[in-house]
Amino acid sequence: MPDQIPTAFLFFGLALVLPLIAQGRARAALLVALPVLAGWQVWTLPEGNLVQVPFFGFELELMRVDRLARAFALVFALAAFLGNLYAWHVRDTVQQVAALLYAGSAIGAVFAGDLITLFFYWEGTAIASVFLIWARRTAGAYHTGLRYLIVQVGSGVLLLAGVALMYRQTGGIAFERMTLGSLATWLIFLSFGIKAAFPLLHNWLQDAYPAATVTGTVILSAFTTKLAIYALARGFAGTEILIWIGVIMTIFPVFFAEIENDLRRVLAYSLNNQLGFMVTGIGLGSEMALNGTVSHAFAHIIYKALLFMSVGAVLYRTGTSKASELGGLYRTMPLSAVFCLVGAASISAFPLFSGFVSKSMVLGQAAEDGRWVVWGGLVFASAAVLSHSGIKIPFFMFFAHDSGKRPAEAPGHMLWAMGLAAALSVGIGVFPGALYAILPYPVDFVPYSMGHVVGQLQLLLFALLAFAWLYRSGIHPPEVRAINLDFDWTYRWLGPRLIGAVGAAVAAVWRAQAAFWTRRVRRFIDGLYYSHGPEGRIASVWPTGTMVAWIAVLLAVTLVLGFID
């Protein structure tokens, strides 16, 4: 494979010709084979700036390859493979082309060596991904897609504004480490934060991901937010404010996830929680913390896709992902249940699973730096993850109350995708050296120390006991159909009504003052009509002598005024 062909262009090329290929196994096979080819290219690329093109006086770097970019590009190619294999049965050109453009744009952004190239790919991910929501072809999905597109394109607009200001200030557009100290860098930082689902900017994630198609949600979970994590790691590593943003991100979603009934929304909140660990690692900024961020992003893409695939398989077979409508499905979907348990163990960071060997580096760095408040927040969030994702997802979907549903097991290709993701999650947990070998910096960390293993098992057992006690005592939030309010309530319900109320008040004031002046003008006109109208005094017939007298008076006044001058 020639190095001169940017990896993203492989995806774009297939997207162009895909509509010309008949639906069927041949097209599905191409969709699965391309990410393998792209992954091989990424693995074999030499480091350096491989592709540069002129663009209106700028020199764009389309393929800046280093260890950080390679790690994210590899897992993006892997996610595209798993997503397309899971979607083998899909015969929808819109979804297939959107998935190709989405994955290609994400990989292209990872290799972007300048901010202009990053912007083009950044917007590419936004425009391509929204079709995975609209492909559901419902009124709700249409409106959700519009909200999602507004947020994602808005992030791109902020990025472009920041790039323009940075070029004006520095004369450069290189995508490298920045410091917060100017409007340009703050705009770029906010742009990255929107895609990373920072607190109060996060609701697009819980709104959009559950609204996508069964297979579209799996693909969405892999790229947008992890691209933002890559951008933050590239541009703002060591930025202090990210530490506290990350800690807040790990904590607040757990409460929403506990009371949420829709299991795809639970996973969306859980995704937000896991992003917090990565953001904290970027803020800590050390080599070990950044290695922890990258390794956790790598592992998270796999096990989160596995969890979304297991919930998606249930949704595909039963038509619902509501916990209140599910339960007892292990009887007829045993393999899906097993794979879901593997994903649950991975996200909960059980020893021998991928989350254990990745998340621990960020926790270890926080403890090593003496940031005990940060460490305590991350530990609390780690325990909560077990409750809302490690237990809640498989328990209420497969093992809780018997829903009476007896759906068939997931299709074979879905099981293969889930099986591969589960095998990778276990393989990374058992043999972490393979993952550590591709991280940006040399790894001097031993995850399976006695203290770490025992401490994590104690934390997990405590969380298990807490969940069991809460559930048995009836304190745990019941799984019921409900609408849970999040911050988006302020701009989706409260904001429009406040604007409507203010608008009505302004309109009332306008109408009152308009009526006041209308009355004054009407009275003035009536007065003029009374005096000068056809029936007015001025319009009446005057005797000739009177008119001559008035003329004489006016002439006299004129003469006096002229004499004074």
Image (cartoon, helix red, strand yellow):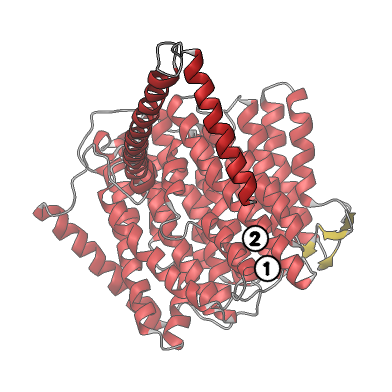
Residue sitting at x 78%, y 32%: 16
Could you tell me residue 271's position as x and y percent? 44, 55
Residue located beneath label 2 in the image: 72
Q: In which quarter of the image is residue 321?
A: top left
Instruction: Check the image and report above or below for 139 versus 542.
Output: below
Residue sitting at x 66%, y 63%: 71
Residue type marked 1: Leu
Residue 414 visible in the picture: no
In this view, the residue in front, 358 or 549, is 549
Q: What element carries label 2?
A: helix
Instruction: Check the image and report above or below for 380 versus 228.
Output: below
| Numbered badge on residue 416 | none
Could you tell me residue 193's position as x and y percent? 53, 60
CB under 8 Å between callouts 1 and 2?
Answer: yes
| Numbered badge on residue 68 | 1
Badge 2: residue crowd in 10 Å (few <14, some 14–19, many ≥20):
many
**How far apart are labels 1 and 2 at the CA level?**
7 Å
Could you tell me residue 363's position as x and y percent? 43, 77
Residue 135 visible in the picture: yes
Residue type marked 2: Phe
